[in-house]
Amino acid sequence: MRALTLTMNAFGPYREKQVVDFSALGDESIFLITGPTGAGKTTIFDAMCFALYGRASGSDRDQDSMRSHFADEDETTYVDFQFELRNRQYRIVRMPKQRRKKERGEGYKEDPARSDLYMVTDGEEKLLATKIKEVNEQIEDILGLDYEQFRKMIMIPQGEFRRLISENSKEREEILQRIFKTHFYADLTDYFKKESSELKTEMNQFEWKIDQELSKAHWGMDLPEDPSSLQPEEYLELLSARLNSQQALIEEQKEQVKEQSNKVEKQQEAYQEAKHLDSLFQTKQKLEKENGELTEDKERIKEKGLQLKSAQEAQEVQPFEHQWKEKKQELERLQHSLSAKRKEKEDIQVAYRKAEAEFEKEKNREDERQTFKKQWEERQLEKERLKEYIEQKKKFEASQKQMDELEKQLKKQQEQKQKVMGEKDQLVSQVKEQRAIANRLYEWKSKLSETQEELQKLTRLQKESNKLTELRQTYHTFMTSYKQIQQEEQKMRGQYEEALEEIRSHHAYTLSRELSADSACPVCGSLHHPSPAAKPSTVPDDHQLDELKGRMEAAYARFQKSQGKLVEVKAEGESQRQLVDALKQDITSKDTELSERMITTWIRESMTEKEKHERELERIQKERNRLEANERKLEELDQQDQSLAESIEHTRSKFASLKESTVREETQLNQLLEQGQMDTIDPRELDNKIIQAKKTYEHAVSLWEDIYARYHQLRDQLQQIQASEKEIKNYVDQTEETVKSTRESFDQTFDQSAFASYEDYQNAVLTKPEMQQIIEEIDSFRTKQASIEGRLNDIYEQLQGKERPDLTVLLEKLEEEKHNLAELQQRLNEQTVMYQQNESVHIQIKGLLEDQGTLAKKYYDIAELAALARGDNTLRLSLERYVLAAFLDEILVQANMRLDQMTDHRYQLVRSDEIAKRGAQSGLDLEVIDHHTGQKRSVRTLSGGEGFKASLSLALGMADVVQAHAGGVQLDTLLIDEGFGTLDDISLEQAIDCLRGLQDGNRMLGIISHVAQLKEEIPAKLQIESGPQGSTVQFTFQ
């Protein structure tokens, strides 16, 4: 990536639009960014990084503080950055969230963050993305770098890489993790650990499941003498033999059930035939009774027939009567409507004549209304002239007041400038003394960080050890409860099986009562019966058996729940013990046994050491804060001094301009006074006159419009009513003729009917539903009578020569056979259930043993991987740290190539191979080889200048390695911020030579520095000037 142009508007210290055209460098590929402290040198870096990623270049800056404090309230903050990559040009415009003044009205509005990405081809721009998320994703795709990689490869901000040199191994790990994104390996380690723990828990669950299945088997008299001494495989062989004997007994019982089922079926058929014959006798009695009732109802049905005939004759006369009555009612309605219409016409005629007179009167007042309108318009014109006069007077008075304020302001600014110059002289001497103390800050921060890391590990070990103790106590509590519940379950199971045995004994006693001499036993077939079963003392019924079974199942459920909880607590305790062992190994070697007293002592010692470091660090930090405050204040005083000088000049210029405009305003005010006595007019009185004139005119217009509308409305209504009255009169005449003709038709039809009088006619009239009901009643009677007689004849034929059977005797015989069948079926079901349960146990145990073997192999593999990944090895090196160490080695190879040149072959950075004390993380500590002494020492012992060289070398090495791992991205721009002031002349020359080597391949290199020698060595400079109205930037060349 090569920068082409950078445009900033209202960004940071830059108030006005600033354009940095990097193409102006020409053949100069290295340039110096120079200017006063706080002028905005680092802001150049921030603008580039913000344009690309929406974030600043340094870790201590945020985008919410990017808007310039110098900017006007309506000015928009944005950055426009154009760059070239792989012979393609791109342009990105980004604006942060900002608060600006509204374009209309008062108050402020908050503009959301925005970004637009374009590709530029032959001067034409093609929009690629507008949404912030899409722009960020496309920038990463185009550059091949994310934000962290971009900062480390293209921008080297103040102090960022000093941290990589001076921080401890843990913090260096976090920096490398962010750059190389190695969190995947940490996630992989956690996955192996979790998978190993889960597999071990599953192994324990398999043992528990096998024990549970073994306890479900039914043995009867074949129970082994000592089942607990048998292995699961031996147990399976005995269970297979038990299944064979059970299957043979089940086949024998099935034959007995089949024979008894045939007996029940035959008895069932005989009972159903007798039941059918009995139902025929019952039906005969019922039909004979219904037939007698129908004979008694014949006379009533005959009367219904005569009533139906009269109603049918009346139905022929009825339509003529209905037609006459309907027309008569219609005539009465029309006559009433005609009377109402005539009354309405008279009322409207009176109102119309009154409205007509008002219309003529108001029509003649048009001139008066125009006069009212003219008076209203003249008053409004007078108000406009008065308003212009008042505004001009206020403007003149404000200008006079502002002139007085400017005179006071000028005097105050001159006094402030004298005060600022006195404060500057006092601060210069204080800053020199404080800088010497602040240089020890990094040394004490590193010591404190190491102590805090050690204290955190010890505190966590103590916490997890306490938790392990609590889990052990919980396990013992659950074990006691488990044994009690197990005894209760065994007791309930024994009671249930004892009840089953008593029921079996009762079945044997029932069979023995049917045995006789020389008769074969239905069970064994023997003809001799020396020991028949005795009658049991007590036999539980079905309700008692179900209750015992329910108690046994509830106890078994409690037993399973308790056993599951016990296994869960045991697994959790085992996992916690492994965690504590791992934490102990992380703190000390395997040969050292850590007691609780030793851990407490170490924690106390670490806390004391931590407090000591914190106190010293706090003292140095306070001194550094005072130094930073004084430096900032000194910069502020410089800016205030320059700003006050410019402000004084600005105030003088503004006063002269204001005086000139005040004279012009006074002249305009006098001209307005000459047009009329404006200063004698009362604005309120004038407003009241305008309101009154407007009301008078609007009232006159409104009155004329109301009268005009009412006159035409009444005229239209009168015409409509007159036409309606005429139409209704015609309808009345026509309806009178129709009433007369329909009456004559009704009289003629009635005379021709069979009715003697109109009263007989009315009595005969029935509604259609009433007539239909009579018809249905007659048809129903005839149908029912024919059906009953036919059914009786059929039954008489079927029952000829037969007697009614006795169903009670037959039913008792059937129930006896069913009872015998139920007893046989119950014995078969019990035996089948026990067989099925034993078969299920056999299958489950066999499957569990196979699954347990497969799981065990998988567990041993995963457990070994988990131990290796988490660093359970002699080097105390986890998988992620191993990968990070490889990256760090690559970085050191590249870094040492430059450090060797800048230190004249004296220093070489190496990764320490020592194992950290008390099991702390190892593998990422840095040391330096001093070839003058031939010994290794800590990088923290390097001086300020040596540390900068190491930091710069490491930063450049980091950029090379990240570039290589980012897919070979070509980077043609590199920016370095500060640090050269700590170098002597020779070291500075070596550093410049090293940086010049980076220009190979036309790479553009920008450096921020105040060092005078760099200003002499580098001809191209990006000069930044600060002022009271913000900073400006431009390229200069020697």
Image: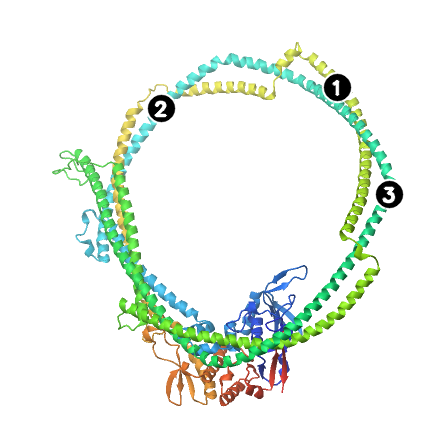
Name of the residue lying farthest toward the left: 530
Earlier in the chain: of badge 1 and badge 2, it is 2
Earlier in the chain: of badge 1 and badge 3, it is 3
Earlier in the chain: of badge 3 and badge 2, it is 2
Find residue 739 and name its label: 1
- Circle 3 is placed at which residue position? 366
Placement of the C terminus among the 4 image quadrants = bottom right
**Residue 507 percent across, percent down from the top left:** 21, 37
Residue situated in front as seen by the camera: 182 or 553: 182
**What secondary structure is found at the residue carrying circle 1?**
helix
Residue situated in front as seen by the camera: 782 or 63: 63
Depicted 692 relative to depicted 761: above or below: below
Placement of the N terminus among the 4 image quadrants = bottom right
Q: Is residue 540 visible?
A: yes
- For disc 2, the neighbor class at 10 Å (few under 14, some 14 to 19, many from 20) is some
- Circle 2 is placed at which residue position? 277
Please report the residue visible at 24 percent of the width from the left and 55 percent of the height from the top: 236
Q: Quadrant of residue 80?
A: bottom right
Please report the residue visible at 81 percent of the width from the left and 42 percent of the height from the top: 700
